[in-house]
Image: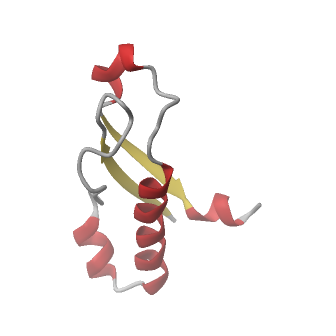
Amino acid sequence: MNVKVRMRLTPQGWLAAPPELPDQRDIQSSGDPILIAASQRALSAVGRGAPYTELNPQHYTSWRELIVTFNAKQACAR
């Protein structure tokens, strides 16, 4: 189970906008409560991770918008 989250960041690594689910319609229409819960947890994790100070400000144009994939199966295997 993979959940993709789109992040838009400021040059300082803060969220410039709330994180989004590019596949939100697919997730909601699936009706799968586990997938819906995993997507909410992924959004929450992105918000709690800010600021992303490990990103080099000199390369801001490369990382100002990112799509990250959360692999729920891999995360639960730990």
Against 17, is 33 above or below? Answer: below
Q: Which coloring applies here?
A: secondary structure
| Residue located at (26% from left, 80% from top) | 29
| Residue located at (46% from left, 78% from top) | 37
Quadrant of residue 9 within the rendered picture: top left
Q: Nearer the viewer, residue 1 or 21?
A: 21
| Residue located at (40% from left, 62% from top) | 43
| Residue located at (34% from left, 86% from top) | 31
Against 66, is 69 above or below? Answer: below
Q: Position of residue 51 (x, y in %)?
A: 44, 42
Q: Position of residue 75 (x, y in %)?
A: 65, 60
Quadrant of residue 77 within the rendered picture: bottom right
Find the residue positioned furthest to the top: 58
69 relative to 66 in the view: left or right:
right
21 relative to 46 in the view: left or right:
left
Find the residue positioned furthest to the right: 78
Query: Where, quadrant-wise, is the C terminus in this rendering?
Result: bottom right
Q: Nearer the viewer, residue 23 or 12?
A: 12
Tally the numbered discs.
0
Q: Position of residue 48 (x, y in %)?
A: 48, 57
Against 69, is 41 above or below? Answer: below
Against 6, is 11 above or below? Answer: above
Q: Position of residue 15 (x, y in %)?
A: 32, 46
